[in-house]
Image: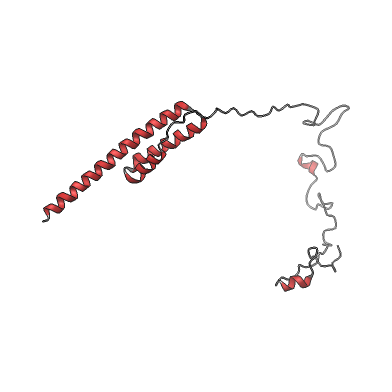
Amino acid sequence: MDPSKSQSAPGWTSDEKTMMGQTPPPPYQDHPQYPNPGYPPANLQGYGSPSQYGGPAYGQQPYPMGAGQQYPGQPGVATVTVQPTVYVTRPPLEHPVNDYLCYSVFTLLCCCLPLGIAALIYSISAREANHAGDQLSAERSSRMAKILNHVSLGIGLTLLILSIIYVVVVSSSLR
């Protein structure tokens, strides 16, 4: 490459780059201290040849070749036939099971946190089983989510009623 030519992108001049506040890159220079580009360098000083380390020397074949022999793994030695992947899916359920997801979120936030979390997990499991077409698993998870939601709602209502009674009793005793 000619060092006198600018390394600008096509259509750019160095004036345009200086207008944008950028300096042009330095021109390309060959490095005379590296006379033999490429691999392996011709003048390896202090290093032995690759054959000294157990590998083939540069330019030599790694396996001895005889008449009619091929490299291991070369095409034509063994043929592998790959079958296309077939995905088997179940049809969607005709009547999907209720997953009680909204009910679970309500009991999680408003009633009883631990039982709400468990109900939410079972609700999500029921929803995934519905999407997968697994009727039995969806029914089982749905039933458990419903039971946990009812128990959580019962505990939440009981605590609410007890706290109202407590406030009424305490406020009436202060009068």
- Residue 142 x, y percent position in the rendering: 41, 32
Q: Nearer the viewer, residue 1 or 150?
A: 150
From the top left corner, tell me how far across and down residue 159 is, in percent.
25, 43
Q: Position of residue 91 (x, y in %)?
A: 55, 28
Residue most extreme to the right = 67
Give the quarter of the image for residue 53. top right
| Residue at 74% in and 73% down | 18
Classify the position of the C terminus by image quarter. bottom left
The vertical placement of 136 against 167, above or below, is above
Along the viewing direction, whichever of 28 and 100 lies nearer the viewer = 100
Of 61 and 134, which appears nearest the observer?
134
| Residue sitting at x 28%, y 40% | 155
* The quadrant where residue 73 appears: top right
Residue at coordinates 34% horizontally, 33% vertically from top-left? 147
* Residue 119 in which image quadrant: top left
Pinpoint residue 26: horizontal percent, then vertical percent: 77, 68
Give the residue at the far front of this rendering: 94
Q: How many marks?
A: 0
Name the quadrant of the N terminus: bottom right
Q: Is residue 117 left or right of residue 171?
A: right
Front residue of 29/139: it is 139
Q: In this image, 136 relative to 62: left or right?
A: left
